Image: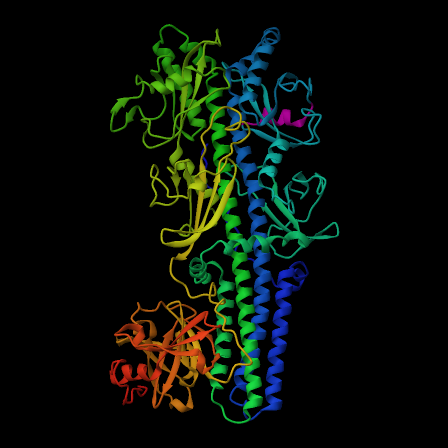
């Protein structure tokens, strides 16, 4: 057996077409929609007022207002639809992951059962018992029952084990509480006629107390003649197994129900049987439609998965994993959980992460782009009306309303985008944490089987009797080798099985004939000794239930690679209290751990998602990241390394120069493994998901707080266009600003230098369709070159006969400041102070805005006059279009 990745890929992003279906259950989205509709109405009122009260004065801004209103209406629909779609997608993705987990873990578990029944059916003691004369069989019945009880004590997933003869008579059974003497079940004849295992799930007289039982059966042969002498039946404790899955992975507030369904869509097992009891036929959703399904008069979001099989084993025919969550409770609590995500982030991290919205949430990126367009239209509308003549009282009222409504619109968009942003991040955090939980569960379940194997194989009578001999004969050694080779051929997750005597000397082994470590190159395995500490631990094992696991490190038995080696003591067949040696099984950790990690990440981008198993000290046991090798240390926060068993956590992080998510879960064991069997070896599953390179973004994370307060009683002053550059707020007298255009309109040119980054041509009559140079303000003030983002804007500035473009990071507002708020600053020798000659005191002096001196700027760029000199003169700079 091996553990290749078989969990199927997750579905693509869901598309929600009918937002009205979900709006009644999303109060936060409904409130957002209402606010958007109120603002939309306000834009219509402003436009109508301007047309009626000052049509002549407002003629220059009416087209802009119309464009704003139309764009706002479109954005309103897109924003609401995206909020609904993202919330539905998050819920559907979450329940899909759990539904897929339910069926795939069941199938992985049952695959092990198909191997168990095949191996146990060849057990020589059991075969000899069924082949013996009735009188001899009666004498050995209790011995065989004890052997089967020993098996069940190792493999606790079984609640019944039976041996039947060819007539269906029950010769031995383990469950004394449900006595069976004879079976007329057709599975008896089917199994006797089959050369493979038979899987049965239905009512059966072999398990009379159960409505339906899952039984694995296999025929057994005479150890000498090969004749069929009976069959073995293993009863799998499905109810207990499913309850463990449900308890471990159901949501804490129990809004959703986890289910296992049969081929007829009827419930086999339910996390809440009082809600959806076994036998109930349910609607399913294999296609992944995001639309609700109706059941029992209630609407549900449903996700259903069928198994893709595991190692060629398809699982019971038609079985499905399903999760159902009522629509009326599906979206409760998501907002609160999401709100905590951004609250704990540094503003710079939140801003930088938001700049990668195009990669981790395309709808969010599209809404941000649309919101920036509307912001620019409003900003340009305010700039265009600066200095207009006419009935200024009426026009001023319209302009004030535009300014106020524009600010409200920007705030609402920023808040709504933030909500969507939080929803996406919260969902990503939850999914990453669930993935890490799944990974440790896969590991614990797999290693549980390894602890069972070594203890059961230590009970092999031939090994026990052979090691008890005073001198180990060559024939006995060869027999040991044959037994180990047979077992290893069935259980391929091991690279080596070996047996050693009481002195720790290896007497038989599978795998390579020599140990290939640097310390002992080419040393034969047989004849070598196991580590003294390991031997001491094995000899100290008190019962057949105890086992020992070596630390995860090189032992020479697995080359120079790290792995676990599971050991069990072999006891004298005649005197079980006497240890005569031991058995060691070398787990093929390198591919098996890697396959588990890849299974948990199935459907995720290998470049953006990485998974690792690490020890408590951060030492890597396995990794899908080729840059992090086994044995090296993973830099992980101390609180994550110290997570209590079974607990998990996830957070936003910066990892390898990338923004992303780290999720971590500490193993908690499976059944008695690591919980009550005395073995303790915590392993952490770590998942990294990256969104993009670390950079200082230009988003909405902290700039919405830089609102400029207005005072209606303040004396009239000068309007300024404000904007961001290098994370600081700057201002330019609005009379010098024609408009703002997106950076995407700029044509890069190799004729750079002096801060020039490209040329820009605008279709404006007053510019006569000419081109102009575009300069990077950041470089002009002595900083590093600007990093262009989706927020980057180019201000078109006019001074006298000259026009230039100025690249800035983002737009802000067009406020008015009284003369008393503008303070002259002394000139410095160089740097940005050369261009900033005034500082504006806004918000009662709590906010300082640097004002760029436009005459100095143009004199410097056009005539080459240093800002500290007299900015007189100037030459034509515009270029004719080629």
Residue 372 to residue 714: above or below: above
In this view of the protein, which residue sits in the foreground, 817 or 776?
Answer: 817
Tell me where residue 192 appears, x and y as whole percent: 59, 24
Q: How many marks?
A: 0
The coloring applied to the image is: rainbow
Task: Tell me which segment is drawn in magenta.
Answer: 184-195
- In which quarter of the view is residue 783 placed? bottom left
Q: Is residue 284 left or right of residue 785?
A: right
In this view of the protein, which residue sits in the foreground, 231 or 298?
Answer: 298
Residue 697 to residue 213: above or below: below
Q: Residue at x 61, y 90 (%)?
A: 53
Residue 717 to residue 372: above or below: below
Residue 859 to residue 508: above or below: below
Based on the picture, tell me whether residue 526 belongs to the magenta stretch: no
Q: Residue at x 25, y 80 (%)?
A: 866
Tell me where residue 334 appears, x and y as whole percent: 59, 54
Based on the picture, tell me whether residue 194 belongs to the magenta stretch: yes
Q: Residue furthest right?
A: 297
Tell me where residue 829 appears, x and y as whole percent: 25, 74
Q: Is residue 311 visible?
A: no
Question: Quick one: quadrant of the C terminus?
Answer: bottom left
Magenta stretch: dominant SS? helix
Q: Residue at x 38, y 57 (%)?
A: 694
Q: Is residue 315 visible?
A: yes
In this view of the protein, which residue sits in the foreground, 157 or 677?
Answer: 677
Q: Residue furthest front?
A: 820
Tell me where residue 8 appears, x and y as whole percent: 51, 46
Q: Is residue 40 left or right of residue 12?
A: right
């Amino acid at each position: 057996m091996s553990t290749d990745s078989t969990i199927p890929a997750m579905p693509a992003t869901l598309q929600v077409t009918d937002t009205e279906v979900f709006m009644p259950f999303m109060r936060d989205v409904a409130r957002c929609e209402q606010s958007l509709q109120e603002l939309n109405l306000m834009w219509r009122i402003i436009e109508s007022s301007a047309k009626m009260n000052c049509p002549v004065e407002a003629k220059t801004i009416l087209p802009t207002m119309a464009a704003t209103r139309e764009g706002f209406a479109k954005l309103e629909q897109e924003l609401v639809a995206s909020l609904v779609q993202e919330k539905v997608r998050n819920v559907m993705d979450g329940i899909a992951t759990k539904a897929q987990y339910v069926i795939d873990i069941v199938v992985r578990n049952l695959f092990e059962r198909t191997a168990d029944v095949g191996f146990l059916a060849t057990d020589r003691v059991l075969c000899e018992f069924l082949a013996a004369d009735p009188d001899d069989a009666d004498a050995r019945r209790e011995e065989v029952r004890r052997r089967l009880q020993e098996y069940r004590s190792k493999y606790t997933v079984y609640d019944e084990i039976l041996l039947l003869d060819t007539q269906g008579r029950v010769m031995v059974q383990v469950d004394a509480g449900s006595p069976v003497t004879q079976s007329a079940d057709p599975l008896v004849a089917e199994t006797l006629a089959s050369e493979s295992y038979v899987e049965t799930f239905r009512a059966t007289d072999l398990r009379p107390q159960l409505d339906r039982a899952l039984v694995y059966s296999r025929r057994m042969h005479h150890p000498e003649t090969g004749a069929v002498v009976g069959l073995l039946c293993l009863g799998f404790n499905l109810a207990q197994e499913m309850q463990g899955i449900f308890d471990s992975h159901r949501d804490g507030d129990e809004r959703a129900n986890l289910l296992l369904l049969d081929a007829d869509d009827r419930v086999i097992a339910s996390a809440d049987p009082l809600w959806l009891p076994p036998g109930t036929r349910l609607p399913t959703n294999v296609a992944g439609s995001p639309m609700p399904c109706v059941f029992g008069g209630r609407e549900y979001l449903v996700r259903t998965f069928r198994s893709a099989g595991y190692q060629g084993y398809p699982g019971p025919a038609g079985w499905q994993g399903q999760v159902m969550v009522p629509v009326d409770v599906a979206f409760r609590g998501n907002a609160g959980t999401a709100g905590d995500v951004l609250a704990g982030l540094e503003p710079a991290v939140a801003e930088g992460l938001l700049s990668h919205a195009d990669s981790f949430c395309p709808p969010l990126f599209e809404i941000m782009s649309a919101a920036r367009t509307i912001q620019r239209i409003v900003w340009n509308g305010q700039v265009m009306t600066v200095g207009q003549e006419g009935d200024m009282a009426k026009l001023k009222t319209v302009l004030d309303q535009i300014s106020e409504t524009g600010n409200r619109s920007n705030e609402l968009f920023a808040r709504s985008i933030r909500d969507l942003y939080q929803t996406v991040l919260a969902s990503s955090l939850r999914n990453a944490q669930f993935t890490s939980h799944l990974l440790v569960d896969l590991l614990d379940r797999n290693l549980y089987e390894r602890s069972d194997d070594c203890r059961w194989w230590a009970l092999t009578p031939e090994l026990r009797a052979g090691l008890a001999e005073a001198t180990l004969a060559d024939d006995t050694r060869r027999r040991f080798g044959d037994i180990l080779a047979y077992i290893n051929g069935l259980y391929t997750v091991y690279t080596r099985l070996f047996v050693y005597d009481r002195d720790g000397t290896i007497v038989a082994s599978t795998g390579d004939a020599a140990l290939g470590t640097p310390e002992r190159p080419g040393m034969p395995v047989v004849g070598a000794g196991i580590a003294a500490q390991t031997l001491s631990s094995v000899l100290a094992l008190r019962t057949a239930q105890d086992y020992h696991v070596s630390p995860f490190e090189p032992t020479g038995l697995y080359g120079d690679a790290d792995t676990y080696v599971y050991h069990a003591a072999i006891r004298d067949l005649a005197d079980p209290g006497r240890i005569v040696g031991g058995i060691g099984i070398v787990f093929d950790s390198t591919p098996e751990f890697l396959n588990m990690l890849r299974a948990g990440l199935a459907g995720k981008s290998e470049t953006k998602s990485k998974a690792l198993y690490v020890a408590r000290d951060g030492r890597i046991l396995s990794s899908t990241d080729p840059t992090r090798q086994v044995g090296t240390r993973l830099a992980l926060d101390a609180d994550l390394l110290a997570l209590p068993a079974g607990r998990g956590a996830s957070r936003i992080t910066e990892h390898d120069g990338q923004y992303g998510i780290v999720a971590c879960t500490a193993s908690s064991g499976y059944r008695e493994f690591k919980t009550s069997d005395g073995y303790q070896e915590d392993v952490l599953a770590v998942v990294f998901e990256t969104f993009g390179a670390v950079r200082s973004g230009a988003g909405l994370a902290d700039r919405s707080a830089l609102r400029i307060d207005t005072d209606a009683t303040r004396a009239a002053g000068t309007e300024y266009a404000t904007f961001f550059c290098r994370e600081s707020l700057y201002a330019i007298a609005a009379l010098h600003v024609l408009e703002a255009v997106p950076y995407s309109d700029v044509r890069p040119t190799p004729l750079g230098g002096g801060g020039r980054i490209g040329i820009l041509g605008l279709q404006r009559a007053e510019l006569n369709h000419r081109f102009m140079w575009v300069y990077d303000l950041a470089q002009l003030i002595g900083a590093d070159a600007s990093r262009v983002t989706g927020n980057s804007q180019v201000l078109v500035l006019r001074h006298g006969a000259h026009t230039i473009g100025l690249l800035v990071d983002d737009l802000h507002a067009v406020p008015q400041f009284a003369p008393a708020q503008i303070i002259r600053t002394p000139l410095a020798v160089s740097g940005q102070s050369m261009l900033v000659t005034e500082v504006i005191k806004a918000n009662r002096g709590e906010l300082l805005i640097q004002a760029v001196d436009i005459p100095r700027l143009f004199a410097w760029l056009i005539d080459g006059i240093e800002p500290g000199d007299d900015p007189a003169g100037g030459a034509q700079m515009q270029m004719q279009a080629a």
